[in-house]
């Protein structure tokens, strides 16, 4: 919009007095009168005429200036669209945005255990987010896929610099791969560490994001829906701290993080950890502890690390989960992954403060480029065996390619190779999955 | 937007003839010619030059005026955002609005019966409403909370002054506390009279709202979803009439209302009345008639009263429900509540025509104020015991505080004290609930 | 918006040099100097004054011209509302639209089989659709009615003229009555051929639409949700080709089409065909094959024809379905319908390329007209009996009237007379239904 430029323009120029241009004529008339070329009576009439026309001229100029000022006033709201829609008042008091996300999956499952090939809308999300009276934020986010469920929906306080307070439904601050949006996951699905993450609860959280570090801590109740009516729901706390000693240029990053969360489920008394292989079309778990009863609480500890150097990126996470039980043995489960990506085109991952954003291709398809192409690789390991719990231990390796023809659009293919399952219902089985996804997100 | 001012501006000023400012020069030239100072030939050249420049000048002014008129034409659509989004055509023919509402609850239940502490997204609503071809309105309203359900969604005719015809899904016109939006409920939840209200059906309704009275009457079928496929759904009629003899100033109100509704459920044959204590987190009823079979129809009668005097407000409602049965005794149930509120800050409740709107704090937080603070209190009584039906009778008292830091935002805390339950499954039990809510709504 | 006109305006006029209007004064001064009326010294001062004022004048004009140019620059986004909302960038790169649809039904079922009278929100849809970086399209469409389900949601490539590539959830290209939006169905519900159509799957489709022909072909997987986790989902292909030898004027059309689709359900092994009578309130099927087991695949063949001549329109479709089974007899089912409509007002059906759009009344109610009124009639026949499968054969005739008071708004009444049911659970039963619908759609 040209309006901010215009405003400056007016401050500088409109203040100029509207000079009457008739001074040369007045000079001539005075001279002719002085030289005796016009009579006194003529001189008088000339001066009167001159005076009247000068007034009329000044008035017309004034009117034009006023109209111009009104015509070039900045609009009170700014409307922009880039896939999504954003409307904000130019005084910064109010803002409203519509954001969306659609992921279309198809998968071919090979090997054992038997899982059904097919297709799936993985996510179909509409989020409405904005700002009220400058200091307050709102969000309502819904996923229409698979029957529908609420996603991060809250009220927030934005009156502090770099720090946000939120109250409502949100993800706990745990795991780099969950802090980054599902749209920006380097491989199609997140790693097997999903067994230990991605929980959304109603709670309060404070979140500070600086260029070289972030911190988040919160207190959480239960999910967004009503649970068993006569059992107290669980509650918990969680915190995550990250540093990015190298984070000055777009394509140079070194990031470390630690996080921990505690969750009390004493009244419910049961917890379960499980995961599908790294695809979400068939819908079967490949490892699963089943119900772990007599559970009082569980605690998770997470370590994370990431780097970007030009086209290359790498990241790794480790999570340890301990389960504290009544009249039963305490348990420990753990998992880790390492993943790396390399852009074939002149592009790089996009680190934001404490998480990864969406890559934006340097040269768009249809604008002299071929978009951004990235090769990716991940090794994941998850162990759900401990003492009497025989949930299974699994390792898999996933190979992938991502194509971002233009920003906000992504096509990905993954080949997931389950190397080994030890223990659990699927002991000794090996599965391979070919998975493709088409996605728009903004 | 400055455009309507501008339009007026133009009507007044642009009509001015674009006066040529050269008349003084012409006068001088004529005088000099008359005085013999310039030759005939020179005079001719001067007049020609004068004429040409006058025409050129007039043309330039005309161009500027035309450009200014175009530049300052009002836009065809007006876009505003204040949390929600509104777009309307300036000719008043079309309008489209997005409205939303999020309520985040947490509750601690004490005493008996046992109910589970926890959290809940109480409402997460998105409504799309608007106007088409000036006389027609549309609305689609959905609540994403707890699995999702349609709320008031209809087509309406707006061609009459102060009267609206609607066809579609809507609430029946019954009870002041249901006619007012859930966002504006003085205590967090509505009173125990919820056992007798808040029904939404598909039907047609006419609704007139004047400053000193309102009237609404409608004919209703069943809910928005398919019911038992071989049973005729119920149907009913309902009407409400209110007067507000005092309603001239913002903070002075006296309001009375009566309402009645009849509902035929002969083919279904079963009806049930029940209510939770005045919180909606655990999800258990505390009084409940269970299925009342052999039901032909039921009829409700409601009386309501409300007042505002400055910071103080009070309101009270009474509802009698009679059940007409085949081959079984007819039944009567009833309930009533009284509630009052007092603003600690210089604010007052916001009465609209026939219902309560959202309080708007006089001094916003962050703008020299602390928002609006209100203390509230309610006594509710509900009797679901009659003849062989032993649903229970309950009284409770609820204490509350509301904080509206800025318009559209609300934080509330309630302490609900169940004084007494007589009869029913929870006979003799006493429950206390501490309930908090965070809410944005626009 | 007047902005495109304005832009032209500027190209033409602003290029004009800002002529100094002082040339006549200079001429006079020169003459007076030449005639010896002013001294050399006076002449010099006059020229200096003239020069300075000319410069000042040119500068002021330049400033006004620049401000005007800025003030009249076209906006970067265009916002329009006509029920729905559309925002697009004026460079054509981005567009975002909100579209909606609400259908409110009520039905009275008479005769046998017994079905329940009642009301229903038949569709309550919100679609978000748009364009990104000119060549890419997105859509997310959700129906909130009856528990909610995803409708056509996809990513598309728009870089070819008249041809669109889509990937995601969409309807297969089969049957004219399904290619036309449910909002534009000439009778309230589609015909009994619904037993053989309206399937939505995830897949890829190419779609070409020309004035005189259209072609569509696609490869499809399964639905948008997860199915049985250990069974491979079905897959299929489909294509449709239409010609419109007469399609030059709005109210003259001749259209023919053929279509076929094949679907492999070998792993699932079961298929079922059924239909309700031509209303969707009670929710019971009147004919139903039940599960046909041992099914390998099924294939459908469709023929369609349509015409418009002024106020009159007619269309007819025939569908044959063959079922290929393992160790069981192959089967054949078929159906057809013929429907016609006649506008009482000076209106006609609205053919788009390969399907029917929404009629737009020539004279709107409230604008000198009574909207558009149409009488409609349809005969449908469906045979689900073959060999051991006794699904039932049904014929019905439906009489209707449509009223479109303004565009985007529709009120319809249908009387559905089931003439005959042969075989199946409802053998010999005759049903009549009175069905009304109120609808807005944009």
Image (tube, coloured by chain):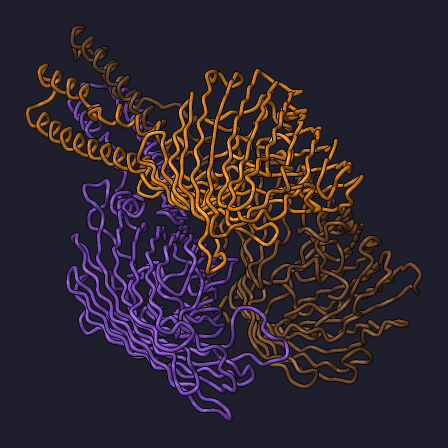
Chain colours: A purple, B brown, C orange
Indicate whether C220 appears above or below A266: above
Is residue B40 shown left or right of residue C411?
left
Indicate whether B14 appears above or below A1: above
* Nearer to us in this view, C17 or A4: A4
Res. A208 in view: no
Indicate whether B87 appears above or below A384: above
The picture places residue A18, in percent across and down from the top left corner, at 27, 38
Image quarter in which the N terminus of chain A is found: top left
The picture places residue B285, in percent across and down from the top left corner, at 71, 73
Quadrant of the image occupied by residue C31: top left
* Nearer to us in this view, C318 or A194: C318
Residue drawn 67% across and 82% down? B114
| Residue found at the far left of this picture | C40
Is residue B162 shown left or right of residue B272?
left
Is residue A6 shown left or right of residue B78?
left
Residue drawn 50% across and 66% down? B364
| Residue found at the far top of this picture | B40
Quadrant of the image occupied by residue C132: top left
* Nearer to us in this view, C173 or C355: C173
The picture places residue B146, in percent across and down from the top left corner, at 58, 64
The picture places residue B83, in percent across and down from the top left corner, at 49, 56
Quadrant of the image occupied by residue A385: bottom left
Res. A204 in view: yes
């Amino acid at each position: 919009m040209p309006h901010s430029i215009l405003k400056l323009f007016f401050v500088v120029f409109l203040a100029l007095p509207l000079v009457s241009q008739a001074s040369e004529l007045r000079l001539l008339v005075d001279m002719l009168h002085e030289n005796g070329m016009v009579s006194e009576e003529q001189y008088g009439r000339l001066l009167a005429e001159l005076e009247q026309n000068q007034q009329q001229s000044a008035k017309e100029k004034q009117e034009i200036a006023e109209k111009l000022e009104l015509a070039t006033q900045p609009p009170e709201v700014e409307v922009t669209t880039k896939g999504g829609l954003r409307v904000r008042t130019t005084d910064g008091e109010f803002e409203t945005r519509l954001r969306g996300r659609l992921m279309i999956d198809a998968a071919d499952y090979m090997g054992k255990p038997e899982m059904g090939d097919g297709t799936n809308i993985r996510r179909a999300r509409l989020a409405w987010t904005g700002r009220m009276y400058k200091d307050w934020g709102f969000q309502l986010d819904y996923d229409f896929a698979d029957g529908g469920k609420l996603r991060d929906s809250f009220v927030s306080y934005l009156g502090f610099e770099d720090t946000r307070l939120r109250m409502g439904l949100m993800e706990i601050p745990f795991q780099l791969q969950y802090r980054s949006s599902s749209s920006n996951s380097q491989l199609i699905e997140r790693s097997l560490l999903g067994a230990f993450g991605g929980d959304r609860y109603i709670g309060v959280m404070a979140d500070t994001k600086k260029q070289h570090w972030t911190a988040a801590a919160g207190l959480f109740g239960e999910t967004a829906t009503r649970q068993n009516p006569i059992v107290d729901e669980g509650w918990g706390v969680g915190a995550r701290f990250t540093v990015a000693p190298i984070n000055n240029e777009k394509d140079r990053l070194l990031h470390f993080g630690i996080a921990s969360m505690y969750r009390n489920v004493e009244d419910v008394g049961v917890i379960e950890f499980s995961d599908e292989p790294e695809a979400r079309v068939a819908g079967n778990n490949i490892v699963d502890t089943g119900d772990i009863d007599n559970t009082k609480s569980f605690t998770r500890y997470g370590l994370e690390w990431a780097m970007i150097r030009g086209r290359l990126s790498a990241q790794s996470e480790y999570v340890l989960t301990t389960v504290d039980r009544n009249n039963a043995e305490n348990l420990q489960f753990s998992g880790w992954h390492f993943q790396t990506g390399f852009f074939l085109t002149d592009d790089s991952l996009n680190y934001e403060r404490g998480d990864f954003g969406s890559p934006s291709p340097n040269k768009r398809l249809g604008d002299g480029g071929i978009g951004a192409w990235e090769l990716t690789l991940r090794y994941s390991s998850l162990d759900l065996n401990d003492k009497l719990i025989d949930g299974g231990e699994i390792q898999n390796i996933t190979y992938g390619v991502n194509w971002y023809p233009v920003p906000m659009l992504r096509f990905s293919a993954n080949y997931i190779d389950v190397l080994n399952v030890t223990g659990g219902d699927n002991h000794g089985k090996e599965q391979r999955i070919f998975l493709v996804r088409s996605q728009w997100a903004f």
